[in-house]
Amino acid sequence: MTGETAGYEALVCELVAAIPRGCVATYGQIAFLTGHPRRSRMVGRAVSRVPAGRRLPCHRVVNHAGRTAPGWPEQRALLEREGVRFKPNGCVDLDRHLWAAFPLPE
């Protein structure tokens, strides 16, 4: 991992740590806030690399449609425990739970 990548991942972790309980943010929104709006996949990579022992609310990050991460069924359970509601299609109800502090990228 390069110094630039490590710095970017640290910034992503700071932003993820700021997402309040009961809210979610999208990979794209976090990328937008880092100043690199086209790096949503890098955000996903950074979130997936967080060590298991580190207390970071990675479960609060979803895709642009509100879908949870594939292969991580616990993510939905963690969000539901925080009061996050899901639509019948299995996506987070972003109208209710999208963190308003995050601007929507255009």
Image: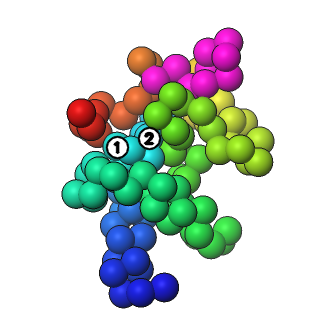
- Describe the element under mark 1 as helix, strand or loop: helix
Tag 1 and tag 2, C-beta contact below 8 Å: yes
Q: Is residue 75 magenta?
A: no
Residue wearing tag 2: 26
Up-down relation of residue 15 to residue 87 (above or below): below
Main SS, magenta region, reads loop
Q: Quadrant of residue 105?
A: top left
**Front one among 23 and 49:** 49
The amino acid marked with disc number 1 is Gln
The picture quadrant where one finds residue 20 is top left
Residue plotted at (44% across, 40% down): 26
Residue drawn at the location 69% of the way across and 35% of the way down: 76
Please tell me whether residue 89 belongs to the stretch shown in magenta. Answer: yes
Give the structural element (helix, strand or loop) at label 2.
strand
Q: Position of residue 52 (x, y in %)?
A: 67, 68
| Residue interval drawn in magenta | 86-94
Q: Is residue 86 left or right of residue 20?
A: right
| Residue 29: image tag | 1
Please name the amino acid that badge 2 sits on.
Thr
What whole-number distance in Å separates the C-alpha atoms at marks 1 and 2?
A: 5 Å
Task: Tell me the residue at 22%/57% (across/down).
Answer: 35
Q: Counting other residues with Cα less than 10 Å from the Cα at mark 1, is it few (<14), some (14-19), or many (20 or more)? A: many
Residue 12: x percent and y percent? Answer: 39, 62
